[in-house]
Image (cartoon, coloured by chain):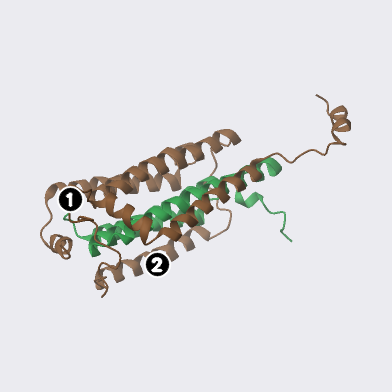
Chain colours: A green, B brown
């Protein structure tokens, strides 16, 4: 508990960056979703760190809500992936170019 | 009570804490890099579990025991299993060629821009102190809810108290959100209904 909060915040920033790079670079929709989860986890770690630094339970309550929203997001997103796969038989974002001019 | 954690943070940290932080940080970063670089989606999902466990350890290290348990149950127990289920269900657990670059020059650009953002955040982290003028706007992490010493105290009790008083409306809204998500997932994943009159002709046209 005695390590200063800056280390946790730095680790969360690095984790968020890795997730953002993955979201930009990868083309598989499932792995892009996993990178979004990485970024949400980095945000959760930041919330918990600030809750400890400021001794305020509000940060942890916010992490609870982020967890609920992440669960709902994954359910709907994977439902969309399954629906797209039924029509196009692909999970690669570059292959979904039906609107390309 | 108010400045206990801040005072603790300014003293010299004990070596078990440093060891726990270093080990969890290594687990988190290795798992995150594994998610980004693995070709097989199943391996990416397993690397994601590794990262989630590391984050849960850091939650415990920062007095958030209940959230660590929820992290393991919800993320590792439900969300990653859902990922694995969809990967297996669609049969896309084959390797993707990630060496080819779909957009020329996109990867260096992504690395440069994310690196600049990260550097900006780190500089802001080092140069500022993040102390606002409004400590304890909601409530302390630890502490007795009532004056009775036998009443429950600690982080889960405080979390539940705030969740069902201060954030009650938001909590009810998440209930509605979850119901909407379930209904949406069922509607999305359902096969399109076949019209009743066209069913007979379609069956005769199909080869099987």
> Of residues A3 and B47, which is closer to you in this image?
A3
Q: Which residue is mark 2?
A: B117
Q: Is residue A5 above or below residue B36?
A: below
> Of residues B76 and A10, which is closer to you in this image?
B76
What number is the disc on residue B18?
1
Evaluate whether label 1 is on the same chain as label 2.
Answer: yes
Eye-nearest disc, 1 or 2: 1
Identify which residue is drawn at 15% across, 50% down: B149
Say left or right for B86 vs B115: right
> Of residues A72 and B118, which is closer to you in this image?
A72
Q: Secondary structure at mark 2?
A: helix
Q: Is residue B38 above or below residue A54?
A: above
Which tag, 1 or 2, sits closer to the chain's start?
1
Q: Is residue B95 above or below residue B25?
A: above
- Residue B106 seen in render: yes
Q: Give how far apart the Cα atoms at labels 1 and 2 are.
A: 27 Å
User: Quarter of the image holding residue B4?
Assistant: bottom left
């Amino acid at each position: 508990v005695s390590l200063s909060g800056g280390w946790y915040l730095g680790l969360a920033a690095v984790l968020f960056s890795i997730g953002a790079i993955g979201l930009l670079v990868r083309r598989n929709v499932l792995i892009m979703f996993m990178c979004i989860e990485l970024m949400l986890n980095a945000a959760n770690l930041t919330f918990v760190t600030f809750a400890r630094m400021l001794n305020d339970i509000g940060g942890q309550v916010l992490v609870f809500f982020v967890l609920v929203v992440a669960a709902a997001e994954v359910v709907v997103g994977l439902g969309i992936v399954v629906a797209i796969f039924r029509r196009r038989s692909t999970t690669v974002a570059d292959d979904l170019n039906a609107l390309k001019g | 009570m108010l400045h206990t954690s801040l005072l603790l943070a300014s003293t010299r940290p004990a070596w078990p804490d440093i060891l726990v932080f270093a080990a969890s940080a290594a687990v988190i970063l290795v798992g995150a890099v594994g998610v980004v670089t693995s070709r097989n989606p199943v391996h990416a999902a397993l690397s994601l579990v590794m990262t989630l466990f590391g984050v849960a350890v850091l939650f415990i290290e920062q007095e958030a025991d209940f959230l660590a348990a929820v992290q393991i149950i919800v993320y590792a127990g439900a969300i990653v299993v859902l990922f694995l289920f969809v990967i297996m269900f669609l049969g896309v657990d084959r390797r993707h060629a990630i060496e080819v670059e779909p957009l020329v020059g996109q990867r260096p650009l992504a690395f440069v821009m994310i690196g600049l953002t990260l550097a900006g955040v780190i500089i802001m982290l080092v140069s500022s102190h993040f102390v606002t003028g409004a400590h304890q706007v909601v409530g302390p992490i630890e502490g007795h809810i009532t004056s009775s010493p036998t009443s429950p105290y600690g982080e889960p009790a405080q979390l539940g108290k705030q969740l069902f008083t201060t954030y009650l409306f938001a909590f009810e809204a998440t209930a509605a959100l979850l119901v909407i998500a379930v209904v949406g997932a069922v509607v999305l994943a359902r096969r399109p209904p076949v019209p009743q009159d066209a069913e007979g002709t379609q069956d005769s046209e199909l080869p099987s």
